[in-house]
Image: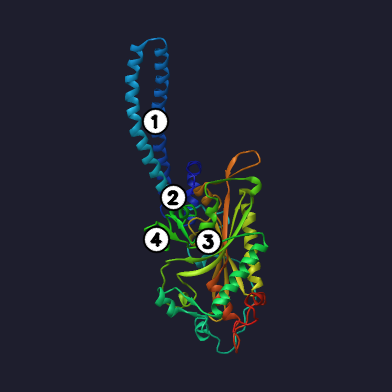
Amino acid sequence: MLQVSYLRQHTQLAKDLLAIKHFSNLDLVDQVIAMDDQRKRVQASFDDLQSKVNAASKEIGNHMAKGEKEQAESIKQNVGAWKLALDPLKIEMTEVEQQLQNLIVQLPNLPHALVPKGKTPEENEVVKEAGTTPVLPAGAMAHWDLIKKYNLVDFETGAKITGSGFPLYIGKGAKFQRALTQYFLDFNTAAGYTEYIPPYLVNAASAFATGQLPDKEGQMYHATEDDFYLIPTAEVPVTNVYRDTILKDSELPIKMTAYSPCFRREAGSFGKEVRGLNRVHQFEKVEIIQIVHPDKSDETLNEMVAHVENLLISLGLQYRILRLCGGDMGFAAAITYDFEVYSAAQEKWLEVSSVSNFNNYQTYRMKCRFKDQEGKTQFAHSLNGSSLALPRIYAAIVENYQTETGIDLPEVLAPYFGAKQLI
């Protein structure tokens, strides 16, 4: 969440930066400042009246100590009237503060200076491409045909059990999913990340803290009776571990990783773009999250990008890294790098990870602070990334490692799967 003080001091700059994100309602910045002006006026009226009450109460005490009851009673009448006037000011103050909150949470995070201008995914900046395009055997299949041929994933039964977009993994297909998950977690913990198993439902306060609310209500499954949300990513519960917390400078950085199922009600469409595992409503993902000192924020982002890159290199997949343009970035992110792997069977790039720096946007919402070496309290910075999202990695490995007689595996996965070949 943006801070009113920043919007006041840098009004035009804030509008210019929001425009890079193609945020259309730039007048909202002025509305926030105007509402804060109103809040200040109500607060000044309340403080002035409260000051009169306090001074008069002291004066009454002095009169009573001198036995001047008549003078004391005269002042009491004024105090009574002032106290009655305080109550509606309290109510007005609460209403104005809520209105201010409702306005400011509609503003997305401001983009980092490195974010390129642009509106669509086609305008994202490719910062690196590496790896070799695999040469597939004659008659190579896309993953949706391979998983059906070898009975690895059953979409039809999943649709019967739940609905479209809920895959059922079977036999070696399920074991392969488990092998990927374990490898990703081990890769992350070896790099110093502490593993968590978080709740898979969160309350509204947690969803608000990481920026899912009020921006993404339509994308989350909502258990209305309990007002819980099924998580769209482990980022939400794990980042909230440090909600309403004041840390010590020496505790930073905090590095966390977690596996979780993820649930997203994203509107689907028809065609190759969403076929098979390309887009599903339930999927698995391993996440990395860091809470860091603001001075280490950019450095940490580069470190996390390198970490995900090394993970993809270990899987032997052709990949590219994109710096997202302003119009393609998430609501809460200040800067995002997407990782895509190349599917030789589909002849297209598949997104498998997003690594983002949120600066203090999330930590301000969730009141995650730390005391620096001088004892001053500051807001920490938060970052997260997929390491990795499984469906498209699963698809890319199955497609790119297919042979005339079956499906091989990346060498690093053999110990986890218990064999050098999936099929």
- Picture coordinates of residue 41, whole percent (x, y): 39, 33
Kind of residue indicated by mark 1:
Phe
* Residue drawn 53% across the image and 73% down it: 392
> Which residue is the site of mark 2?
105
> Which residue is the site of mark 3?
234
Kind of residue indicated by mark 4:
Ala
**Above or below, 132 relative to 261:** below
Kind of residue indicated by mark 2:
Val
The local secondary structure at tag 2 comes to: loop
The picture quadrant where one finds residue 54 is top left
The local secondary structure at tag 1 comes to: helix
> Which residue is the site of mark 1?
46
Instruction: Look at discs 3 and 4 and give the one toward the viewer.
Output: 4
**Above or below, 333 relative to 130:** above
Mark 3 vs 4: CB contact within 8 A? no
- Picture coordinates of residue 131, whole percent (x, y): 65, 74
| Marking on residue 37 | none
The local secondary structure at tag 4 comes to: strand
* Residue drawn 36% across the image and 41% down it: 95
Kind of residue indicated by mark 3:
Ala
- Badge 4 density bin: few <14, some 14–19, many ≥20, Cα 10 Å: few
**Left or right of residue 106, residue 124 in this image:** right
Q: Quadrant of the C terminus?
A: bottom right
- Badge 2 density bin: few <14, some 14–19, many ≥20, Cα 10 Å: some
**Most foreground residue, 423 or 298:** 423
**Left or right of residue 410, residue 79 in this image:** left
Instruction: Look at discs 1 and 3 and give the one toward the viewer.
Output: 3
The local secondary structure at tag 3 comes to: loop
Mark 1 vs 4: CB contact within 8 A? no
- Badge 1 density bin: few <14, some 14–19, many ≥20, Cα 10 Å: many
> Which residue is the site of mark 4?
223
